[in-house]
Amino acid sequence: MSYDLSIVIPVYNEEHRIGKTLTELAVFCRAYAGSTEVIVVDDGSLDRTVEIVQGFAPQFSAFHCLSNGHNQGKGAVVRQGMLAATGDQVLMTDADLSSPLSGLTKLKEAMAEGAAIVIGSRAMPGSEILVRQPRFRELFGKTFNLLVRLLYLPYLRDTQCGFKLFTREAAQDAFSRQRLIGMVFDVEVLYIAKKRGYRLKEVPVVWINSPETRFHATWKNAWQVLRDLISIGFLHRSENRR
């Protein structure tokens, strides 16, 4: 069965907040004008995350919990969920709903105007940052975004916000070619999509930083991120347009 909208949520050790997220999501899906499916992909959680997630299944008409036996990385489970999605449009969003689901309206409007991938952006005029990240992580993010613009995606201001809407065609095409599983996977997927000829567009979003984020900026992480970022150009140097 095909749905109007698939919502993909990666989770890892989220027992303290996933219940609130799924409650909000159930309310959203009941009010949504079209048909929806929800795909929660667990990255080998060691706590009660999967048990809590499975307990929410009766609240959704179409609900899937994909559980992995070991931790692979966010990029791996997002890819798994995006490739499993059957909706005409596929939304990826974080387990903490840092960008509220109400922001989907702006993403859908941009897609109606012809974009195949719409990226929620915290860096565009009109975005609202209600709770900011720690200063070092903000600096890390700005430096990362500068490198992304210099190397691959010069017109995008924020590739890392976890609130993105894809057409099913674009999601299947880009994620099936994804190779990286760390935090740089977003850049890789968007770079693939650009090279394949899909139209990308950013829209401003409301964003609330979560203190329970799974990524903590350190100098060790910085070297790992730089390595993965540089590798994108080599991994996809021969990528062709559709």
Image (tube, rainbow, N blue to C red):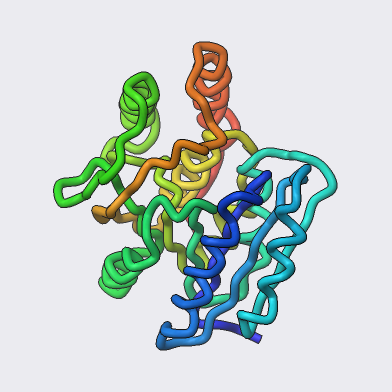
Locate residue 138: give its quadrant.
Answer: top left
**Residue in front for this viewpoint, 157 or 150:** 157
Relative vertical location of residue 200 with respect to residue 237 in this rendering, above or below: below
**Residue in front for this viewpoint, 174 or 137:** 137
Q: Name the residue: 54% across, 43% down.
A: 239
User: Does the image show residue 194?
Assistant: yes
**Residue farthest to the front?**
16
Q: Name the residue: 56% across, 82% down.
A: 3
Relative vertical location of residue 100 with respect to residue 151 in this rendering, above or below: below
User: Does the image show residue 237?
Assistant: no
Relative vertical location of residue 225 with respect to residue 166 in this rendering, above or below: above
Indicate the position of residue 242 as horizontal and vertical percent values: 50, 59
Number of numbered tags placed on the structure image: 0
Locate residue 81: give its quadrant.
Answer: bottom right
Indicate the position of residue 148 as horizontal and vertical percent values: 38, 30
Indicate the position of residue 35 as horizontal and vertical percent values: 52, 86
Indicate the position of residue 169 as horizontal and vertical percent values: 53, 68
Relative vertical location of residue 207 with respect to residue 88 in this rendering, above or below: above
